Image: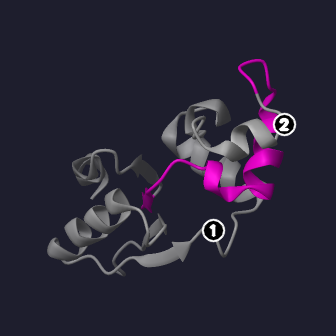
Amino acid sequence: MDDPKTVIYYNPRCSKCRMTLKLLQERGEEPEIIEYLQTTPSRAELREVLSLLGMHAGQLLRKKESAYRDAGLDDASSEDEILDAMMEHPVLIERPIVVRDGKAAIGRPPENVLDIL
């Protein structure tokens, strides 16, 4: 039987991303690295990740980024408005996200991802 594939949505400039990747590698994982600022997830991918996390889009949103204001988002923004903004401004997506074997976790703190390994 094949080992389950591990994917990390990653920003190399983010210390939590680097720490989470190192933690995975120390556990013998060699995840597929998706640098989501270069390869923006599709709406379907975002919906799938949100479903695995058990969250709505607003919970995965980095509200302190200037792109949040630039996109015209606020607490009343709809799911579709938030997903549109995330695809246009991927910096708004909370990171890192690790997906493995039908489960997902946000690496804040990095140890959160251990629950899905």
**Quarter of the figure with residue 12:** bottom left
Residue extent of the magenta highlight: 74-101
Return the x and y of residue 74 as percentages of the image width and height: 75, 24
Name the residue that disc number 2 marks. 81
Question: Which residue is nearer to you in this view: 71 or 60?
Answer: 71
Q: Based on the picture, tell me whether residue 77 belongs to the magenta stretch.
A: yes
Name which residue lies at 61% across and 44% down: 65
**Quarter of the figure with residue 73:** top right
**Quarter of the figure with residue 89:** bottom right
**Whole-number angstrom distance, CA of label 1 to CA of label 2:** 19 Å
Q: Based on the picture, tell me whether residue 33 belongs to the magenta stretch.
A: no
| Circle 1: residue type | Leu
Name the residue that disc number 1 marks. 37
Q: Is mark 2 on a helix, strand or loop?
A: helix
Query: Does residue 117 sit above or below 83 in this rendering?
Result: below
Name which residue lies at 45% across and 79% down: 32
Return the x and y of residue 108 as percentages of the image width and height: 34, 45
Query: Does residue 76 sit above or below 98 in this rendering?
Result: above
Most distant residue in the left direction: 26
Q: In the rendered image, which quarter contains the N terminus?
A: bottom left
Return the x and y of residue 116 as percentages of the image width and height: 31, 52
Query: Does residue 42 sit above or below 32 in this rendering?
Result: above
| Circle 2: residue type | Glu
Name which residue lies at 54% across and 74% down: 34
Question: How many neighbours does mark 1 have within 10 angstroms: few (below 14), some (14-19), or many (20 or more)?
Answer: some
Question: Which residue is nearer to you in this view: 44 or 16?
Answer: 16
Q: Which of marks 1 and 2 is nearer the N terminus?
A: 1
Q: In the rendered image, which quarter contains the C terminus?
A: bottom left
Question: How many neighbours does mark 2 have within 10 angstroms: few (below 14), some (14-19), or many (20 or more)?
Answer: some
Q: Is mark 1 on a helix, strand or loop?
A: loop
Question: Which residue is nearer to you in this view: 60 or 5?
Answer: 60
Report whether 99 appears left or right of 37.
left
